[in-house]
Image: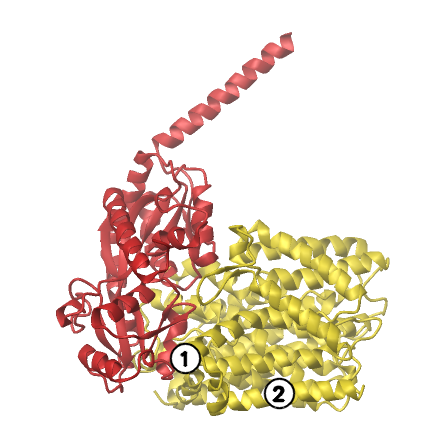
Chain colours: A red, B yellow
Amino acid sequence: MKKKIVGCIVLAAILALVWVGTASAADKFPSKRINYKICFNPGGESDITARFQEAALKKALGVDVNITYQIGGGGALCWAELTRTTPDGYTIAGHNLPHTVLQPLEMGNAGYKTLDLKQIYMFESTPDVLLVRSDSPYKTLKDFVEAAKKLPPGVFTVGGSGTSSANDLGTTMLNKAAGIKLTYIPFGGTGSAIPALLGSHVTALMSYSTMAVQHKGRFRALAIASEKRMEVLPDIPTFKEQGYDVVEGAYRGVAAPPGTPDEIVKILADAFDKVMKDPEVKKKMDLNAFKTEFMGPEESLALVKKKMVEYEQIMKELGRIKK
Amino acid sequence: MGFSFEYLFQGFAIALTWQNLFWAAVGCFIGTLVGVLPGIGPVSGIAILLPLTTVLPPTSAIIMMASIYYGAMYGGSTTAIVVNIPGEASSVPTAMDGYQLAKQGKAGPALAVAAIGSFIAGTISVIALTLFAPTLAQFAVVFGPPEYFALMFMGLSLVISLSGRALLKGIISTALGLTAALVGQDPLTGAERLTFGSVTLTVGMDFIAIIVGLFAITEVMVNVEQRITTISEVEVKNWMPTWDDLKPCWGTFLRSSAVGFLLGLLPGCAPSVTSFVAYDLEKRVSKHPELFGNGAMEGVAAPETSNNATSTAGFVPLFSFGLPTAPSMAVLLGGLMMYGLQPGPMLFIQNPDFVWAVIASMYIGNVMLLVLNLPLIGVWVRIVRIPFYILGPMIVFCALVGTYSVRFQTFDIWVMLIFGVIGYFMRKLGFPIAPMVLASVLAQMLETALGQSLLISQGSPLVFFTRPIAAVFMVLAFLSIGRGIWAQVKAKAPEVVTDDAEY
């Protein structure tokens, strides 16, 4: 009997300690190391952005930030895993548009739903850019489109990163807007599509703004798929100003597991806001032609919801999903 | 952009500062370590150390990361030779002959030959990199999807010579490897295949898990069954190679360096591919091909030489174009970008100090690795004398940790264990394992290139024969297949499969 009482007291004490422990942990979040998951290969755009942020993020949060990789299924594996993770804010993952909208739409069972991912912050975008070799006869988008019209449909090939990616959709939108048929050739990543254009194995690339900077001198950018010209790439005209309604690109941000408390999400969002406004980080992002974005949780969610409607419409038109 | 001695000497001056020497040494050490540990490859090694770039100056950081990459190629041979676990995919061919040599008590000479071959290849490649980097870079982009397909197709035709007499079994083994590689998403369209609706299976099977299972787990099972007490009973007296050991290898060192370097210029042509190609080439030119698979010193020299040449060659497209040829190179590219260094021809003009210091450090790093690795051989060779009841569990432990550390997925551990069992039955039934490994390594690139080529040619397979480079590889592949079948019919195939070693 006595033992039982002692046991109860000890148990109560432990429970109390645990309770105090969790309470205080919630009081001052974060109090331990944060795991920042990257869902793509090291060296890709997501990884590079995270590495730019790493030092400033540690400073803003006051705890260690560990960048880890979980790669597979074009990111789906990592996001599915995130939805099953404890929602305490200590595990966050980079997430990308259009991927997190298109995968649940197309795959049937992607292991997660778009809105399962709790939006924290959207910090950058890379608009699509149409690139040809510097010695190409096509000086402008008009030259390119007219040449494509003269040849049998499908002869012009456009390389890009992945299927149902921003590059793929951008090419499809251009086909529609210009009334041409370009054959889209998917590659395993942004980087692996580059040699195909360097060696003239494809006519053009639909790539990201970052590549227009990295391969300046070798490639000529015919158009950029943003609403307005990018500050760091003032010489590249938009598709829109040349008369083609093509606005497409990839957005990158971070998300937390579903059910993460709003207070914690706010703390994380504030930290990312600080990081993205750090002049050192901004400088690195600009230099590499990442377009910096500053969207907090609500704004990011609004963007995701807007894109869900847009992409569903496009995918239906393309016949890639059932109507 | 061109080469000048002035730049190179300036590079040496920077690389030889105590600080840069220190980081090169750290990199060489870590590289050897990740090479020795199965599963933990240079990609994770470099990625883990990436945060250090925030505290180190760019030259030191890149010197260190580069030395991890080529250092891993030195270490990869160790476990392959000593305990039949290839530390990296590129060391699979090494295990085929190296382990046989270890059983014969010649682990020391085999390890030394691997280290010397690595050193020679590393040095030759750095010289080529120094003199011809900008010119050679052009070679990297000559290869489009059709050329890649033809190259990989030729690579796949190597299964014929890897199968020896057991051609039918070799082809079955190849088919198994290709099937395993099919599981997951189509690399081109992302469509799911053989996943049976499971989200876990969509990630596909990692070939490191497959390799570690087929080699390490299978080996432990076979050894337990045969009540092996130690891997080698032979007293190891001398760990340095004799003149007779080295004599047949000189030609191998040069040929494999050339093969490894030239193929290494191509993005996507990882050391794991070139080491198989070099191994096969040596077997073909050898005067005694029957020794391959039963402990030929050239069989160790070829893959270990070529994988080092490949890793150094990768710096040509990286520096000249910003093209990463392998995952490790992509991480390095990320490192460059963090410093705001834009790779490309401008890098040679804007940051000559940096480029030439990194290149100069590679000369130094190769010497360091040789000095580091030769004395270590004395330590490694003792492993084969460890009682198996201690060594066996250690191998299983290393295999588990190594496999998990590639992608941090429990699924991979199951894949490894299942392939361990598959490998066990394959060995019992006399199925060669190497064709399966080669197939799983090549499958994805082969398939991607095929799909892309057919999209470009609008469905016509003629594209593989109308483009000259592709045509050459296709012809070579068909010759190799024809020759293999002819030899089979004539029953003159070199004996690779014996009762003792089913590789």
Q: Is residue B317 above or below residue A14?
A: below
Q: Which of B344/A134 is in front?
A: A134
Q: Name the residue under label 2.
A: B478
Q: Mark 1 points at which residue?
A: B458
| Amino acid tagged 2 | Phe
Discs 2/1, front: 1
In this image, B42 relative to B219: left or right?
left
Residue B426 lies, in percent from the top left, at: 75, 65
| Amino acid tagged 1 | Gln
Mark 2 belongs to chain = B
Is residue B116 visible to the viewer in this orientation of the structure?
A: no
Q: Residue at x 39, y 28 (%)?
A: A24
Q: Tally the marks.
A: 2
Residue A128 lies, in percent from the top left, at: 27, 66
Farthest residue, direction top: A1
Q: Which of A249/B349 is in front?
A: A249
Q: Quadrant of residue B245?
A: bottom right
